[in-house]
Image (cartoon, rainbow, N blue to C red):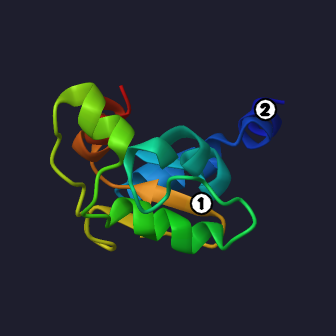
Amino acid sequence: LMLHQVQYLGLTENVKVRRAGFCHRTTFTAFLHRYYLISGATWPLNTSGDMKQTCSALMSSGSPSVFSSRAVGGMEPLLLKEGVDYVLGNTKIFIREPKTLFRLESQRA
């Protein structure tokens, strides 16, 4: 019974992701809906395009959006590197370090 519950809740997948060195994972759609405002490369959000490519543009963007620069007084651009700071899977983005996630959240605030 307990093994069935662990599999049902997706805990085995969670353990595999953590062992691979990633602190956070989410679908491209959920990620973009949460963070698209922090980059001029993804504002306004176009949901009909390639979500994987849009996520990559957001993470490696050197141009903060009007909203993030006004709200925080000119935060630095993201300029994150794929393979180092994050990895794009087939349907999800995997973020390695908690500091990367905290940086995204601080720019979103």
- Which of 60/67 is in front? 67
Q: Secondary structure at mark 1?
A: strand
Q: Amino acid at mark 1?
A: Lys
The quadrant in which residue 67 appears is: top left
Image quarter (top left, top right, bottom left or bottom right) of the N terminus = top right
Q: Is residue 21 left or right of residue 99?
A: right
Pointer 2 local density, CA inside 10 Å: few below 14, some 14–19, many at least 20: few
Q: Amino acid at mark 2?
A: Gln
- Name the mark on residue 5: 2
Q: Is residue 8 above or below residue 41?
A: above
**Residue at 15% over, 48% down:** 76
Residue 85 figure quarter: bottom left
Marks 1 and 2, how far apart in space? Answer: 24 Å
x 23%, y 63%: residue: 79
Give how far across and how far down residue 43 sits, in percent. 50, 53
- Which residue corresponds to the image point at 26% horizontal and 70% vertical from the top-left? 81
> Going by the image, does 26 lie left or right of 80?
right
Circle 2 sits in a helix, a strand or a loop, which is it? Answer: helix
Disc 1 to disc 2: CB gap under 8 Å: no
Q: Is residue 99 above or below residue 88?
A: above
Circle 1 packing at 10 Å, graded few (<14), some (14-19), many (20+), is some
Residue 44 vertical placement versus 72 (above, below)? below
Quarter of the picture containing the C terminus is top left
The foreground one among 78 and 10 is: 78
**Residue 79 horizontal side relative to residue 39, left or right:** left
Q: Residue placed at 78% from the left, 32% from the top?
A: 5
Earlier residue among tags 1 and 2: 2
Above or below residue 27? Residue 11 is: above
Residue 94: x and y, percent?
Answer: 46, 58
Write down the residue under mark 1.
92
Provide residue 69's location: percent of width, then percent of height.
Answer: 25, 39
Task: Give the x, y percent position of residue 86.
Answer: 36, 62
